[in-house]
Image: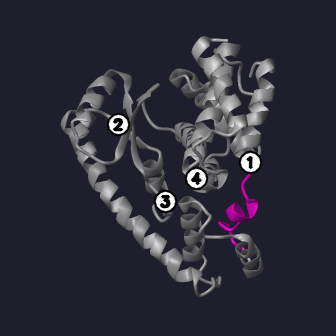
């Protein structure tokens, strides 16, 4: 990270905030006292759907723990709806996979569907289909997928090389965290992906982070992966290096990416609140973003 961008990066991290570590801790064997302590401050109405499903998984995998009478049916209901919703997307996934197979296009599932296969008993809130294809087949694959009528977002990524390693799964998990945060959601919405990253890291004694950085460079996502990996390091220590290799991007481009993150993260929250007049700090931020990214200052 260029030195003159560090203050801007620090501002990015301040805008993201932190996650209640007690929520992640519930995934492992926890006591009734620890659960009660967490639930005392937790509000299902104010929590993102991802954390609700995560807590429902805790309830499912720890039948010895007692949840209060009003919360238990709501968590069970969320799990049932999640399964129903994912069945609909899985129908579309099968159509996409069959179309790729019929055209002899090699592919790998990434994102939530890859993790669903790796952790079949772990419920997750899935909104899209992400697929990795080789560079030679990429344009053909886009044409095929574009012809499929679907209300589900289908995302194709080019593969740097063949195969799907744990390091590549980590790369796309980091990208998922960035996408969640840039959409304006709280860090708590990343709880399932953070759990996935901890799970992936447990499968291999030493992960080659150079592969992750090569993927980031190949896709032109060095800034995005830096943001996400720094966020992950606050919950999973020692997984990623304190300092990635030097950027191939200029300082100006890095600044533009960071300001773009801040702007895109703020605007959805302003719209959701129904505010007709943009608050002064956000307006100033918008002008800064406009000057830097549009005029190249």
Task: State the separation of the CA atoms marked 4 and 2.
Answer: 21 Å
Task: State the separation of the CA atoms marked 1 and 4.
Answer: 20 Å
**Judging from the image, what secondary structure is the residue with disc 1 in?**
loop
Image coordinates for residue 289, horizontal then vertical, percent: 64, 24
Q: Which residue is mark 4?
A: 196
Q: Which residue is mark 2?
A: 107
Quick check: marks 4 and 3 in contact, CB under 8 Å?
no
Depth-wise, is mark 2 or mark 1 nearer the camera? 1
Residue drawn at point x = 62 percent, y = 64 percent: 46
Q: Which residue is mark 3?
A: 124
In the image shown, does 119 or 188 lie closer to the viewer?
188
Point out which mark residue 17 bears. 1
Give the extent of the magenta segment. 17-30
In the image shown, does 83 or 255 lie closer to the viewer?
255
Most common SS among magenta residues: loop
Which one is earlier in the sequence, the residue at label 4 or at label 3?
A: 3
Quick check: marks 4 and 2 in contact, CB under 8 Å?
no
Task: State the separation of the CA atoms marked 2 and 1.
Answer: 36 Å
Q: Residue placed farthest to the bottom in the image?
A: 69
Which of the 4 image quadrants contains residue 154?
top left
**Judging from the image, what secondary structure is the residue with disc 2 in?**
strand
């Amino acid at each position: 990270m260029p030195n003159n961008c560090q203050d801007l990066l620090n501002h990015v991290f301040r805008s993201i905030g932190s996650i209640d570590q007690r929520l992640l801790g519930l995934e492992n064997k926890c006591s009734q006292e620890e659960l009660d302590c967490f639930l005392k401050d937790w509000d299902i109405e104010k929590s993102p759907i991802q954390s609700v499903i995560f807590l429902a998984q805790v309830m499912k995998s720890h039948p010895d723990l007692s949840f209060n009478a009003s919360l238990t049916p709501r968590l069970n209901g969320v799990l049932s709806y999640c399964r129903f919703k994912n069945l609909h997307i899985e129908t579309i996934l099968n159509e996409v996979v069959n179309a790729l197979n019929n055209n002899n296009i090699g592919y790998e599932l990434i994102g939530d569907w890859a993790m669903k296969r790796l952790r079949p008993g772990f419920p997750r809130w899935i909104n899209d289909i992400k697929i990795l294809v080789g560079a030679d087949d990429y344009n053909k694959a886009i044409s095929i997928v574009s012809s499929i009528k679907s209300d589900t977002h289908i995302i194709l990524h080019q593969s740097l090389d063949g195969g799907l390693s744990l390091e590549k799964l980590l790369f796309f998990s980091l990208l998922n965290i960035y996408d969640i945060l840039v959409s304006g959601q709280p860090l708590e919405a990343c709880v399932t992906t953070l759990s996935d990253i901890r799970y992936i890291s447990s499968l291999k004694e030493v992960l080659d982070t150079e592969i992750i950085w090569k993927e980031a460079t190949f896709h032109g996502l060095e800034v995005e992966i830096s943001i996400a990996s720094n966020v992950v390091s606050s919950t999973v220590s020692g997984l990623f290096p304190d300092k990635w290799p030097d950027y191939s991007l200029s300082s100006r481009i890095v600044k533009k990416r960071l300001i773009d993150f801040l702007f895109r993260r703020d605007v959805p929250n302003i719209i959701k609140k129904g505010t007709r007049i943009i608050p002064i700090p956000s307006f100033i931020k918008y002008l800064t973003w406009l000057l830097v990214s549009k005029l190249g200052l």
